[in-house]
Image: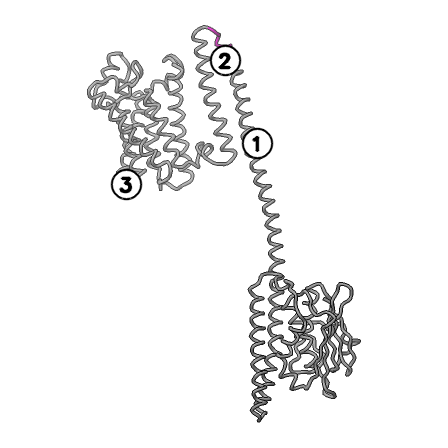
Amino acid sequence: MYQNKNARKLYWIAVFTIILGLAVSLGWAFDIALLKTIVPHYVSMKLNTALGFILTGIVLLLVIKEKWLQFAAITSVVLAVLGFTSLFQDVFGYNLGIDQLLIDDLDAIRMGQPSPGRPSPTTSLCFGLFGLIFLAIRSTNNHIKNIRQYALHLITLISFIAIVGYLFRVPASYKLSFFTSMAIHTSITLFILSIAVSYLYSGLGIIGLFTGGRIGNIMARNLFKRSLIAVLILGYVQLSLVRLDLVSIEFGIALFATSYLLISLHSLWSTAQLLNGTDMSRKKAENELIATNKNLEKIVQERTGYLTKQNKQLEDFAHIVSHNLRGPTSNLKALLYFYEKEKSIEERDIIIGKFEKTVVNLGTTLDDLLEVVTIRHESKKERGKLNFEVLFSKLIDTYQGKIMESSAKITSDFSAAPTVEYSSVYLESILHNLLSNAIKYRSSDREPSIHFETYTQGDKIGLIARDNGLGIDLALNGSRLFGLHNTFHRHPEAKGVGLFITKAQVEGMGGEIKVKSEVNIGTTFEVVF
């Protein structure tokens, strides 16, 4: 409950309080004046006061350690009874015989003081309040907690006034004699004890004003510290000047007020500087936060755009894989069909050779496609010098089965532009889609004829793929020609993906694709790189 950062300090304050009480008790037991007064010729601490400090220190130790709490409660009752019983004697002028119950106060008797051995009324009140405070120390009721805290503040105020009386050397005839009859070490110890115990609940009462970390708490600490020092110094200087008859009381008060006003202005100025600095730091932090948020928004937008592109590329890649592998797979099935039908061993060997080439090319295609996955954003568009004849020959080998099945006549002429700077993955995919579509959508009324050629126009290179297949009704389907999953002929392998991918790849590399077609005559695709 009380294991906070102040617990260790409280522990040593409690130990100090007990030691002080024991030292003063020894002073009374052996008549040692120094132990009784600490400061010679000042008011001595009475024996009952010393006993009160011993009881207070013991209770505080038990509360901090949270041990023997029942004994702590009993001790608190004894402390409260001791304090209020002594106060009762002063208020009602009745002697209960407890002042010199253990030891006679011979010093007070010799000086003819009334009520020898009795603590000052303020000391008795403070010990009585401490007893009640410790009895309520474990209460969770908010009203009791607040009352307990302000009772501690009252003890702080009483002891502070007594300390000020000593600092200013206020004579016994002054109105403050009621307070200054408290011994100097009594008042200092009560002052320290009351503040230390109030820190157990630092968020309550006046302590809460000085212990928080907000701007108001910072301002309060700054102003109070300066004001307290100013009042003590100015008050001491004023009294000293008056006592030396250097100034009159009236002039001393005016001097005090003027000096305090100037010091207050300085305190306000320094506090304003502190608050302004805090405000500037806050604004700077807000501006940095705004800049960070804007930068974060930019990063999020860039990341979102990047992820969108990545998703598009993944989708594109999925279509490429499914579409590009469908042709070679069908080719393998066709070669297997011819192999099973062929009786000649020589022809079977030839078909097996074609089968092996198709498998090798299929493996190469898979390797290339898998490599694309490992390359980061936009890297599939990296350009290299590619040879049309080499790529096309590789493609013909891959489609040998389909070519044999369809009896297609395939020709090419790449002499006008043998090479091109392009993405190898994209160009292979474009050639693959154009050839597979030409074979797939051939006419059953005639032998398929497919021709590929290149041309140059200025600094541009073009590719033409021409066939005599079924053709497409562009008047009816021209706007849908390159749409995803749009098909224009009934065919078991028609997926409406190839032309979509081809157009996306061509335009992604900054080119364009054109088409001319007539139904039952054929189709011509023109790719401008």
Question: What is the magenta segment's predominant secondary structure?
Answer: helix
For label 3, the residue is 67
Circle 2 Cα neighbour tier, 10 Å, few/some/many (<14 / 14–19 / ≥20)? some
Task: Name the foreground residue: 383 vs 430.
Answer: 383
Mark pair 2, 3: CA separation: 53 Å
Q: Disc number at residue 276? A: 1
Q: Was residue 253 drawn as part of the magenta stretch in this picture?
A: yes
Amino acid bearing label 2: Ile
Extreme residue toward the front, this view: 415
Pointer 1 or 2: first along the chain: 2
Pointer 1 or 3: first along the chain: 3
User: Do we see residue 33 in this rendering?
Assistant: yes
Residue at 58% in and 69% down: 368
Task: Name the foreground residue: 176 vs 385.
Answer: 385
Q: Position of residue 388 (x, y in %)?
A: 68, 71
Task: Relative to 264, say whether 315 is above or below.
Answer: below
Amino acid bearing label 1: Asn
Q: Disc number at residue 46? A: none
Q: Position of residue 10 (x, y in %)?
A: 34, 33
Task: Name the foreground residue: 491 vs 344.
Answer: 344
Mark pair 1, 2: CA separation: 34 Å
Q: Was residue 296 drawn as part of the magenta stretch in this picture?
A: no
Mark pair 1, 3: CA separation: 48 Å
Using the rendered view, name the quadrant where residue 38 is placed: top left
**Mark 1 or mark 3, whichever is nearer to me:** 1
Pointer 2 or 3: first along the chain: 3
Circle 1 Cα neighbour tier, 10 Å, few/some/many (<14 / 14–19 / ≥20)? few
For label 2, the residue is 253
Q: Which residues are magenta?
A: 246-256
Q: Secondary structure at mark 1?
A: helix
Q: Quadrant of the N terminus?
A: top left
